[in-house]
Structures are given as C-alpha cells and as structure tokens.
Image (spheres, rainbow, N blue to C red):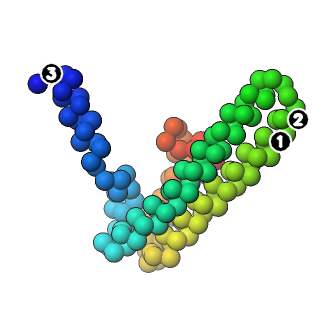
Amino acid sequence: MSFRYTFLALAGLFLFIPAAFADAPLKSALGLTIEQARQVDEIQAKHRLQFASKRTERNTELRKLRRARLANDSKTIAEQEAITDKLLDQLRAIRASEDDAIRKLLNPEQEKKFEDYIKQRKEMVGSSRDAAEL
C-alpha cells in the first residue's frame, strides 16, 4: 500500500473516533460510573458548543485588538480591550457553569479528584488551552 493510501486510511479512522475519547482521562481520573460518564458527556457537549462559539467571537475581537495596537489607535484599543475582557468573562462563566454541573454528579471522593483535575487544567498552557486564562 502506498504512503498516500495509508495516510488516507489512517485519516479516515480519526473521523469515526467518538469525541468522548477526548474526555476519557476525566472519566478514568474520577472513577465515574457509566451513568455519571453519560451525564458528563451531555454536560460537556452542551457547554462546549457555547464555549466554542464564544471563543471564536473572542478570537475575532482579539485580532481586531492586535490590528489596533499595530496602528497605535488608542480609541479602538480601549474599545476592543473592553469587548475582549467581557468575552473572556463570558468564557469563564461558561467554564464555571460546566464545572458546577459536573460537581453536582460527583461523590465527595470524586469531587476531590475533580478539583485536582481543574488545577491541572489551569496549569496547562499551549495551543490546546486558552493560554491558561480560563
């Protein structure tokens, strides 16, 4: 099999992997039951759609802010900073709402593990995290 076909076959496999695998560490780290895992999946699906939409909006506004800074446009910088700060607060609220909904499902032992998970999440930095701002 040529490289091209091997690559296409492997790429096709990733299209069919359920999104739940991305959250498998949370499920195993907390020792969730099957029912808890199902409920967490529902909570995350709901919140992540909201989060992604708001993050896209914020990224658009951040690009406008960068352009204003390059142009040394103090009026637009002030306006954009207010907009991006508000959007960041909204992102934090979505994340907090998701975390609170998950906490309600957990027993005390799982809740302790979840707090450790949140601490780890906040310490992560890189392209897969929003620069640890959330």
Gap between marks 2 and 1 measured at Cα: 6 Å
Q: How many marks?
A: 3
Q: Which residue is mark 3?
A: 2
Q: x%, y% of residue 118?
A: 52, 58
The picture places residue 105, in percent across and down from the top left corner, at 45, 76
Element assignment for label 1: helix
Marks 2 and 3 sit apart, C-alpha to C-alpha, by 57 Å
Q: State the residue in front, 22 or 125.
A: 22
Q: Is 102 drawn above or below residue 64 in the view shown?
A: below
Q: Which residue is mark 2?
A: 75
Amino acid carrying mark 2 in the image: Lys
Q: Amino acid at mark 1?
A: Glu
Left or right side of 76 for 11: left
Q: Is residue 57 above or below residue 38?
A: above
Left or right, residue 116 beside residue 55: left
Judge from the rendering whether residue 120 lies leftward or rightward of residue 7; answer left or right.
right
Image location (x, y in percent) of residue 133: 63, 47
Three-letter code for the amino acid on which mark 3 is drawn: Ser
Q: CA distance from mark 1 to mark 3?
A: 54 Å
Q: Secondary structure at mark 3?
A: loop
Q: Name the residue located 83 percent from the left edge and 41 percent from the top edge.
A: 79
**Residue at horizontal 74%, vertical 27%?**
67
Q: Which type of secondary structure does the marked residue at label 2 adopt?
A: helix
Q: Residue 79's mark?
A: 1
Indicate the quadrant where residue 107 lies: bottom left
Residue for point 15% across, 21% down? 2
Q: Is residue 85 above or below residue 38?
A: above
In contact (CB < 8 Å): disc 2 and disc 1: yes
Question: Does the rendering let one see residue 116?
Answer: no
